[in-house]
Amino acid sequence: MRIKALIEAGQVTIAQPPEQTGDRRTVTEASYRVKPGETVILEVPPPEDATPRAQAMDLDIVYEDEHLIVIDKPAGLVVHPAPGNPDHTLVNALLAHCGDSLSGVGGVRRPGIVHRLDKDTSGLLVAAKHDAAHVGLSELFARHDIQRRYRALVWGHLAQASGSIEGNIGRDPNNRKKMAIVPRGGKHAVTHYAMVESFGLTASLIDCRLETGRTHQIRVHMSSHGHPVLGDPLYSRAKRGRSAGLSDELRQKIADFKRQALHAAELGFRHPVDGRDLKFASEPPHDMLALLELFRRLGGA
């Protein structure tokens, strides 16, 4: 199980013989059969403290009761401890805020966490305060019985105002830090999108609703269709002509936007304990709103 987890984390690569390519590629499936002449390289992350410590920090709490808590997460905040981010995460803050009641079903490093948002994705996230709530919320996610709407600013003008993208998502065999639509293996993923506003041929503001919740799902799916999320450091490679015709002010604003323009704007679900229907909404943060206003004022190409 440990080796499988390391493979899923992109920590296992294959080095091919120098007489062939000499390249290294990431192993994406535990069932991979090693071929003659290949060298398997296993990189084990350094050990970290098993139990996160409580660290008080300001949280934007949208809703809270004795069973669960809904947070409006700012961009830049990591959800749970991981290699490179051992502390000052949302989990550390929740431990300080909720104390010993926080659910342990998610494991000692992810207490209370039922789902996650990428570090630089802002917006709504629910966490469980005790095990019963955690189990109930996890079942809702497993049945896809959760309403999740994301707002994203993507490059280009969408040929269709709405549609669906379907494709299994797994580890990118050429870059272990990235995910990709893979022909074999991976996990089933479906994203529904709809255009909200168009900025000429340059960019579009869209809403995405998730049927599934895979790592980097919206970022991978939109990029695969030629409309990567603006500012995305992994999936939005610069292309000539993308910002052609834009004002210097708008081009500079885009260059200064150092994260993906993606926000979890809506979260709805049935309360796992008392059965009430809950629905929460969140406006994009200031930096994303400022960029949108500049697009509206200066227009797209």
Image (tube, helix red, strand yellow):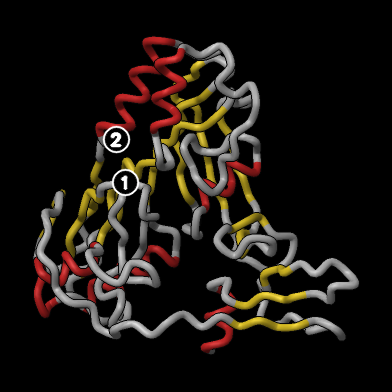
Q: Is residue 140 left or right of residue 97?
A: right
Residue drawn at the location 25% of the way across and 71% of the way down: 112
Q: Is residue 282 above or below residue 70?
A: above
Residue 227 image point, x, y percent: 59, 34
| Amino acid at the residue labelled 1 | Ser
* Residue that lies at the very extreme toward the right in this rendered image: 19
Residue 296 image point, x, y percent: 39, 14
Q: Quadrant of the C terminus?
A: top right
Secondary element at image label 2: loop
Secondary element at image label 1: strand
Residue drawn at the location 74% of the way across and 80% of the way down: 32
Name the residue beneath numbered marker 1. Answer: 122
Q: Is residue 150 above or below residue 250?
A: below
Q: Which mark is residue 218?
A: none
Residue 48 image point, x, y percent: 34, 82
**Nearer the observer, 205 or 212:** 205
Residue 226 image point, x, y percent: 64, 36
Q: Is residue 140 above or below residue 167?
A: below
Location of residue 83 (image quadrant) = bottom left
Name the residue beneath numbered marker 2. Answer: 284
**Nearer the observer, 141 or 75:** 75
**Nearer the observer, 42 or 117:** 42
**Nearer the observer, 23 or 72:** 23
Q: Quadrant of the N terminus?
A: bottom right
Q: Are marks 1 and 2 in contact (CB under 8 Å)?
A: yes
